[in-house]
Amino acid sequence: MKTPLRVGLIGYGFMGRAHSNAYAKVNHFFDLEHQVVLKAVCARDDAKVKDFAARWGYESTETDWRKLIAREDIDVIDIATPNNTHAEIALAAAKAGKMILCEKPLSMTGPEGKKMVAAVEKAGVANMVWYNYRRVPAVTLAKQLIDEGRLGRIFHYRAKFLQDWTINPELPQGGAGLWRLDVKSAGSGVTGDLLAHCIDTAVWLNGSIAGVSAMTETFVKERKHNLSGKVEKVGIDDACAFLARFQNGSLATFESTRYARGHKALYTFEINGENASISWDLHDLHRLQYFDHRDQGTTRGWRSIHVSDGDHPYMKNWWVPGLQIGYEHSFVHQVADFIRGVETGKPAGPTFRDALETQMVCDAVLKSGKSRKWEKVGK
Ligand code: NAI
Ligand code: SOE
């Protein structure tokens, strides 16, 4: 008999669906001592939340997240709401002794994130942030290769995350669907939304970032606000590029924009070490490119590893070798690892504390974008 893990999800948008799909699948594909139970979903529109619950198999609904947190039949609170709501919900959930899975970015700012870390650590509750790209098998394989020392000393890290969906100046800001353009809801633009993913992966693969020098730009300065109906100043960064130095001495470049016509979600990274290099591209997510200088000269070259074999990370849980999986599976892997962490007492990352490090890098990037100086990453 498995132990039930009763989930209370807040938010039924893009991530509400991705997480619900992961909860539905995880026990079918991973051997766990816990059985996920879709206990309740919460969002403000009663009719819509009921529809969502019926479609995804949640047992009940709430329209006020405070009521969800107060319920004794919920073990885990899953925060899948806009960024400006993460802290308030997480602080209340920790106080109520609930485990917490929180969407990225952890918080609006580093200081807000610090309060969230203090709250979960004081309450002693399991916690994790949904930086899901770590758990794309090819990215996890990159981590294994680096940890095995295959690359040797790392010199360079290069990452970018490009989109093109906000180029139209007539696009409003704020409200459902467009809260990412409103700084009061999002905290920042591409820095917290997209570069945060790149930073999380980078710190995980290559260690802490010591300092950054950034440039940011807001190409469209004013947009109509969906809630006020008025034209308001745009407070987010539409684009951001920054240089960074890792504590291990390696150099990095990061770039993100929502103004790269033709690119929808082009997240790529490349790492160059003394012995080997690796590179990865979200648009070809099951492949890891690997070059090893120690290979015999006549056949040396970039290998395109199709990360779909049984000895590749997570892959033995899925289909037969050679058959690939996709974006949504990274969330299934994350739930599986979270539950294993609860079962073994060895928490899986990124914890709130890990995600705070990313937040501190984002803060330093935004500060540098304004000061036009190198900024140290705060502790
Ligand atoms: P969305 O706009 O699709 O959905 C947000 C949901 O939150 C909606 O259901 C909305 O009704 C609900 N909501 C807003 N305020 C609420 C409140 N006070 N009480 C209850 N429900 C409330 O947004 P999306 O794309 O799902 O993003 C949510 C979070 O997930 C954000 O923090 C975002 O940064 C993160 N995200 C992470 C991704 C990843 O790759 N890990 C991908 C997309 C989003
Ligand atoms: C923005 O379009 C977005 O959905 C981000 O919010 C996610 O974090 C990223 O994974 C994909 O793009």
Image (cartoon, grey):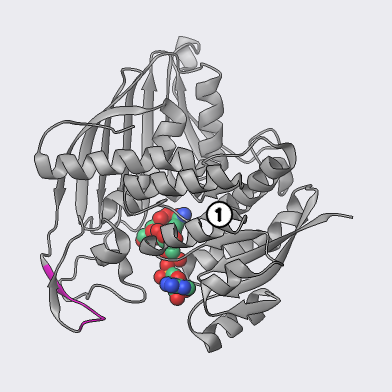
Residue 182: horizontal and vertical position, in percent?
25, 67
Quadrant, the C terminus: top left
Q: Which amino acid is tagged 1?
A: Ala
Tell me residue 300's x, y (percent). Answer: 46, 17
Q: Would you place residue 284 above or below residue 376 in this image?
A: below
Q: Could you classify mark 1 by the number of other residues whose Cα lies within 10 Å: few (under 14), some (14-19), or many (20 or more)?
A: many
What residue would you read off at disc 1?
94
**In front of the other: 314 or 26:** 26
Kindly identify the residue that appears in the image at 73 percent across and 37 percent down.
344
Label 1 element class:
helix
**Could you tell whether 158 is left or right of 49 in the image?**
left
- Residue at screen point 39% across, 37% down: 357
Q: Which quadrant of the figure has residue 160?
A: top left
* x and y percentages locating residue 234 in the rendered image: 16, 65
Q: Position of residue 161 (x, y in %)?
A: 32, 48
Decide which of 21, 262 is in the foreground and name it: 21
Q: Which residues are magenta?
A: 222-228
Quadrant of the picture in which ligand 2 is shown: bottom left
Residue 251 forms part of the magenta stretch:
no
- State the quadrant of the N terminus: bottom right
For residue 79, above or below residue 34:
below
Q: Residue furthest bottom?
A: 47
Q: Is residue 320 visible?
A: no
Q: Is residue 226 magenta?
A: yes
| Identity of the residue furthest to the right in this view | 1
Q: Residue at x 62, y 48 (%)?
A: 333
Left or right, residue 118 beside residue 67 = left
How many numbered tags mark residues here? 1
Q: Is residue 271 left or right of residue 56?
A: left
Asked whether mark 1 lies closer than 8 Å to ligand 1, one says no
Q: Is residue 3 above or below residue 18?
A: above
Which residue corresponds to the image point at 25% horizontal and 58% vertical from the top-left? 258
